[in-house]
Image (cartoon, grey):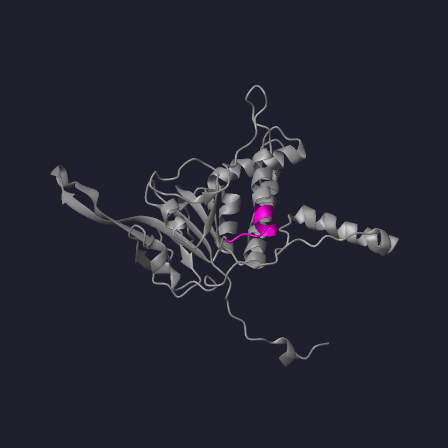
Amino acid sequence: MAKLMEMLKTTKNVKPPRCLFYSTAGLGKTSLASEFPNPAFIFTEEGLPADTEVFSFPLVQDSKTGDGQDIKGTGYDQFVDYLRMLGTEPHDRKTLVIDTIDKLEPMIISKVCAENGWPDIEEPGYGKGYIAYKDKFADVLRMLNKLRTVRNMAIVILAHFDIKRFDEPGTEGYDRYVPRLHKKVVDLLVDDVDMVGFINQKKVIKTQEGGFNKKHSHAEGHGTRVIYLEERPGFVAKSRYKTPTEVVYHEAQGYKVLADYFPGMDTPPTAIPEPVLTEEQEASAAVEAEQLADNGAPDTQSTTTETPAA
């Protein structure tokens, strides 16, 4: 048994960041992500700004049958294949951008339904379908985390916004901005990433006196965009870095104001790739390894091993 002081080591977060950015419409989520070093985009929707040029995979979407019906699970399989290529093939990309995660959500649900033979996610009843979806979503996060570890890539996830009722113990409920994902997985994602940035315009609420002792409130702003990095009652946000509670986001300078807080961004991707496997693939590989051990090592005279080029 190892001694206590031999097991205790100094630990520091030196890996590239995992970021989730969400916002109201048209405030520059994609433009901000494009400023990260050497990004590779996986688009799940067509929303690239006209003045922005990025390296990207073909659009992720379910394949169609001859009569135009979606083939369940094919969009998810396409997405996983892109992750596999980034994990196993040489490249110079330092950032993976998923644009957007909420448009990927129905494709993950479609895959769950295809695997279980369900016509829709409500079919099994009692919320069992969404539990299976949560497990599949967790698989996606594991694949992203492995890609971050083995290829030293930053992970940037973009999402649209939603407004949800939040019932906090001890207070009356209120509305807040949240990423547009099913409640089963939004907390899973927020807990996993290192930064959640809510992008919005800076506003001032002004109140005017009206007739009959009534007051009218309205918001005023001057177009100043802000990335909020600390949670408030009105929105979800967080940062594991020593960032301020908010930063002003000017066009083409969003990453610049965040970069000093991020570790691991000056290290190139690893030269020798490792496969990024789903949980099912890892389990299958473990079974194959056990079978090989039971049957004995293969005849080395009749086995050829190919070594991939670095």
Q: Is residue 114 left or right of residue 194?
A: right
- The quadrant of the picture occupied by the N terminus is bottom right
Residue 297 locus on image (x, y percent): 85, 56
Residue 273 shows up from this direction:
yes
Q: Dividing the picture into quarters, in which one does residue 145 lie?
A: bottom right
Q: Is residue 129 left or right of residue 232?
A: right
- The quadrant of the picture occupied by the C terminus is bottom right
Q: Is residue 186 left or right of residue 217?
A: right
Q: Residue 12 or 253: which is nearer the viewer?
A: 253
Is 89 contained in the magenta span? yes
The residue shown at (40%, 47%) is 22
Q: Main secondary structure of the magenta part?
A: helix
Q: Is residue 62 above or below residue 164?
A: above
Residue 175 shows up from this direction:
no
Residue 173 locus on image (x, y percent): 38, 47
Residue 130 locus on image (x, y percent): 57, 40
The segment highlighted magenta reads 83-92
Q: Is residue 80 left or right of residue 217?
A: right
The residue shown at (30%, 50%) is 251
Residue 132 locus on image (x, y percent): 62, 41
The residue shown at (43%, 55%) is 37
Q: Dividing the picture into quarters, in which one does residue 127 lie?
A: top right
Total numbered circles: 0
The residue shown at (60%, 76%) is 8
Is 260 contained in the magenta span? no
Q: Dividing the picture into quarters, in which one does residue 208 lie?
A: top left
Q: Is residue 263 above or below residue 189?
A: below
Q: Residue 195 or 71: which is nearer the viewer?
A: 71
